[in-house]
Image (tube, grey):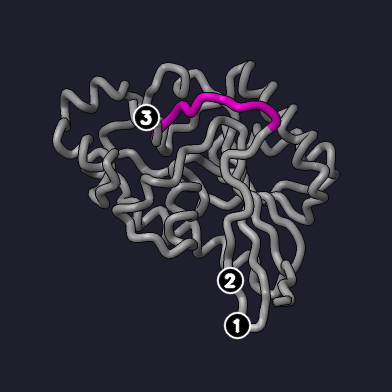
Amino acid sequence: MVNIESLIRVVLWRHGQTDWNVQNRFQGHSDIPLNKVGQYQATEAAKVLAALRPNRIISSDLIRAQQTAAPLAQLTDIKVEINPGIRETDGGLWEGKLASENRESHGELFASWYEGGDEPAGVTGERRSDVAKRAVSVIEKETANFSGTIVFVTHGGTVRSVLGSILNLPISKWGVIGGLSNACWSVLELTKHHTGSKWYLAEHNAGSLPEPVFGDDAVN
């Protein structure tokens, strides 16, 4: 039997629902708050995540992530740390616009980006590889010389980029990782065994109830 020891658990928790999610507007860096449903989702999800007994909570600087982190911080009495490195993709000219509007204005680019291309989002925004680079850098820094559980409160597009990068998938294959529903999460575990340490995807799109996927990475 191979001896496997879990060293670090990373919870990638997507923010709760916003009005722009429901409207299918590209949010990106736009600082949109949770709606009432999103606030409820965050409160209910926090009850589940608190059972993991996290050691730290690190949130994107965008308000929808901070509002999602707040109920968990209250339950666990852990101060939320803010890090802009795990914010959502800069959507450039697409931010605030409906998917139909972005298809009309940048049809070829928009289609290629949604199919997994690494072009800058919205012409002037970020590439998926850029998002992965900055977000993975934060995770690597915060998990260095650490053992335990960290909850990163972040965004759907960011989580997909992180998972694709950490799991060593080609960028063109990152789309096979399904999107996260609002206030749901993925769990990465760094394990140590005889061949060394390696990240594993322990859970994906987990939550108390199934929810539809809205937002920047929803293919609709």
Give the CA separation, mark 2 to mark 1.
9 Å
Asked which secondary structure carries label 3, the reply is: loop
Residue at image position (31%, 21%) is 98
Residue at image position (76%, 33%) is 71
Residue at image position (50%, 47%) is 159
Asked which secondary structure carries label 1, the reply is: loop
- Disc 2 crowd, CA 10 A, few/some/many (<14, 14-19, 20+): some
Asked which secondary structure carries label 2, the reply is: strand
Circle 1 residue? 195
Decide whether the magenta segment is chiefly helix, strand or loop.
loop
Circle 2 residue? 198
Nearest the eye: 27 or 209: 209
> What's the residue type where badge 3 is placed?
Phe
Q: Which residues are magenta?
A: 208-216
Quarter of the image holding residue 4?
Answer: bottom right
Circle 3 residue? 26
- Disc 1 crowd, CA 10 A, few/some/many (<14, 14-19, 20+): few
Q: Position of residue 55 (x, y in %)?
A: 79, 56
Quarter of the image holding residue 139?
Answer: bottom right
- Which label lies toward us, 1 or 3? 1
Q: Is 73 on the left or on the right of 141, as rendered?
A: right
Give the CA separation, mark 1 to mark 3.
42 Å
